Amino acid sequence: MQSALIQIASLRNEAGLSQAELAKKVGTTQQQISRMESPSYEGHSLSMLRRVADVLDATVQVKIQPNKTIRNAAEWPKEKPAMAMKPDPNKVCITIRLDADIVEYFKQQVHKAGGGNYQTMINNALRHYLEKKQDPMNEEILRRVIREELRAAG
């Protein structure tokens, strides 16, 4: 990760940007950029690195290599690798089309909060609405609910 930190600072300097200017373009704080460039910081997220790279007209590449050369399949570990994170059995993956301004609002809320998940925020807004009112849900109501939440948030 050390070389990535040096690369971020170097690319930022080459672009003639201060940490505050880069932060504004990325949608974060100057303090976050400063932390990202600090060798002692260990909280890097791939999504934030990609956002910074996009602003700096760069790409993020992740490379995982074994510590030693594995010569043949017999040397591979026998156990099955575990998933890093098991999916929540109470969640269902769907595809839904939302207005761009609605999605952008929730993404901005995540940035203001310093992290999180905009999909969870949308889910929470819908749950809040359903707990208040028991109308049948359709696309028109879904859009109205999200707009009401946007107005309430200011």
Image (cartoon, helix red, strand yellow):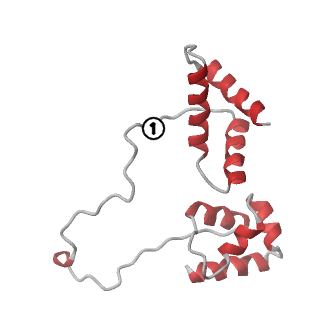
User: Going by the image, does 44 lie left or right of 148?
Assistant: left
Q: Amino acid at mark 1?
A: Cys
Spot the residue most to the front.
132
- How many marks overall? 1
Q: Residues within 10 Å of mark 1 (few under 14, many from 20)?
A: few
As drawn, 108 above or below 71: above
Reading the image, the residue beneath label 1 is: 93
Position of residue 8 measured from the top left corner of the image (x, y, whole percent): 68, 76
Secondary structure under tag 1 reads loop
Which image quarter: residue 54?
bottom right
The residue that appears at 67% across and 57% down in the rendered structure is: 114
User: Going by the image, does 149 lie left or right of 127?
Assistant: right
As drawn, 37 above or below 96: below
Nearest the viewer among 55 and 122 is 122
As drawn, 13 above or below 113: below
Position of residue 90 measured from the top left corner of the image (x, y, whole percent): 40, 37
